[in-house]
Amino acid sequence: MDSRYFSVKVVRALESFKCLIRISLDRTVGELANLAIERVGLLPTSSTPSIVDDDGLRIEKIMAFDSASSSDVTTNGNIVDASTPLHVIVDFNLMFVTVFLVCKVKVSGSKSNSTPSSGDNDKQGKNAFDEMMSSNIKYDCLPPSKNYNNLRKDHRMFNDILSLLKEMNVGFTAHNVNSLGKQFVSTLHNTLWYITSQHHKFKDRGLQIPDIFQKFSGYYDNKACHKGPPQMQESKLRSLIDEMSDFLMIPWTMKFTKLFNAVEGLINILKKYADFLCQQNIRSQARNASMEPLRNPNINFSLTPIQKLTGPIRADYMALDATLSVKEPYEFLDLVEFLPEERFDRCHG
């Protein structure tokens, strides 16, 4: 696994310490935070209250940002779970990490032995960190919709996805709507567009697409485009699965339970169908490599004579019929010149 440099800021009350850490991307955000705390040598000093509890310093929250300037404003960041792999936040270009610490302290002085009043408790419990963290983060922004004069069907699907998220009260902060927001909607759109004409195949395999995504069927009409029905590829499905799975590891997704469950369900059926395609490919490769024919003509053989129709001949077959009428029995005739011009009609005519 590759390694990257992260700019890490460790904040304790009104103090902050910065360091630059190179770490492997298969490590977690929590491991990066602990390494940063150790790197800056954050220990109690004479100017800070002493730690009296067994736990000492404790990580209260970890936030990730896409720039150093953004990390100075906590509402601009993305709260990240300590168990999140580092390669996930790298995928979203969140290379600036801030670790917030809290500790239990004893208050020195003559008033330390007295019983504080409820008002004193309130003042004692609030500090700059609490004030900073208490600000409300609003998830009410969505990426801009497609507003072209002639919307393609994939653009319409993109706009319909935005409408769905709005109906579900799913949104992003003003800061991450152009990063996390665009990436999530784009990835979900690419996934739903890839399977829009394949819903029946999942149903045939007994796989149920989550209810909120069933409306995204039939946006692509291959016949109208004079093309054959698209075929799903295992490699493409695996790629979409990996991209969608990254979002399940971000705390933002966990805020919206219904969306989280639907995305997780969609990933599960994509995995099952990809496994089916994998087994199908293995069987096909084995048959192709076998020296024995799949069907034995000595056993599986039958001859069914078909009499010529005596009724009227379809107009598109009249040229062929006129040519056959002057040919000798069993005389060779190349049918290429009689095939339809459209490729789809040639295959399904």
Image (cartoon, rainbow, N blue to C red):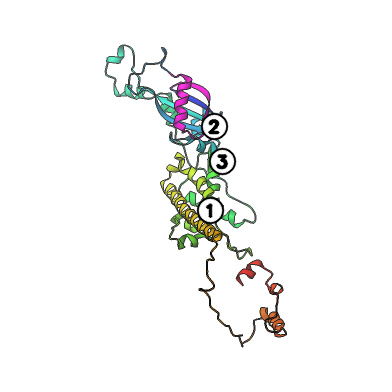
User: Which secondary structure lies at badge 3?
Assistant: helix
Placement of the C terminus among the 4 image quadrants: bottom right
Check the image and name the residue furthest to the bottom: 310
Q: Which residue occupies the foreground of this view, 197 or 145?
A: 197
Q: Which residue is mark 1?
A: 234
User: Does the magenta segment cover residue 40?
Assistant: yes
Label 2 sits on a secondary structure element that is strand
Q: Please report whichever mark, 2 or 1, sits nearer to the chain's N-terminal start.
A: 2
Mark 3 or mark 2, whichever is nearer to me:
2
Q: Dot 1 lies on which element?
A: helix
Say above or below: 217 vs 310. Answer: above
The residue where tag 2 is placed is 3
Q: Is residue 168 a member of the stretch shown in magenta?
A: no
The answer to whether residue 176 is left or right of residue 226 is left
Q: Amino acid at mark 1?
A: Glu
x, y percent for residue 345: 63, 70
State the extent of the magenta-drawn residues as a range. Answer: 13-42
5, 104: nearer the viewer: 5
Residue at image coords 46%, 63%: 204
How dense is the environment of label 1, judged by Cα within 10 Å: few (below 14), some, or many (20 and up)?
Answer: some
